[in-house]
Image: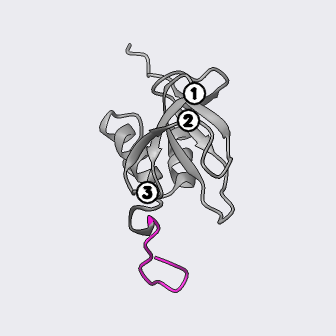
Amino acid sequence: KDEDGLAEDVAGDGEYSCAMYVSSVLSLHGMIDRPHATVTTTLTKMAEHGWNETQQPEPGDVVEWGKSADGHEHIGFVVGENACISNSQSTGNPQRHAFSMNDGRKPVRYWKYTWPKNN
């Protein structure tokens, strides 16, 4: 809901659903509490559940881009050298692409999960 208590489509009918995509995958694997609709909340919950910044991204790590010109953040998964997968704004579906976004943004952080040690 927005500040007036009205329902708000934060995913923009799939256009801005990268956080839902990433957090749903992480939630399915017990690496975060549940799916989230925003990048900010997803990153906060990731940090609470054992995710830490890394300088050496590997497949399976989460990649974070800064805000676009219209103020939207973006996240996805590292899938290989100079390759990631994230939700496409144009199609509303996950797609493989280079780390550089079409608008020129480059990754600002990479996140790696630390599995809890079993006692």
Q: In this view, does 70 lie above or below 110?
A: below
Query: What residue did someone put label 3 on?
Result: 17
Tell me the chief SS of the magenta region.
loop
The residue that appears at 54% across and 52% down in the rendered structure is: 39
Q: For the magenta stretch, what is the residue range?
A: 1-11
Determine the CA span between mark 3 and mark 2.
19 Å
Q: Residue 32 location, x and y as percent?
A: 42, 40
Amino acid tagged 2 = Ala
Query: For this view, does 71 lie left or right of residue 44?
Result: right
Q: Mark 1 vs mark 3: give the one in front.
A: 1
Mark 3, secondary structure of its residue: loop
Which one is nearer the viewer's eye here, 23 or 119? Answer: 23
Tell me whether circle 1 and circle 2 mark residues in contact (CB < 8 Å). Answer: yes
Mark 1 and mark 3: span between their CA atoms?
Answer: 22 Å
User: In front here: 54 or 3?
Assistant: 54
Relative to the observer, which residue lies in front, 96 or 78?
96
Q: Is 64 one of the magenta-colored residues?
A: no
The quadrant in which residue 26 appears is top left
Q: Distance between the residues labelled 1 and 2?
A: 5 Å
- Residue on which the image places disc 1: 82
- Between disc 1 and disc 3, whose residue precedes? 3
Q: Is residue 95 visible?
A: yes
Image location (x, y in percent) of residue 11: 44, 64
Mark 2 = which residue? 98
Label 1 element class:
loop
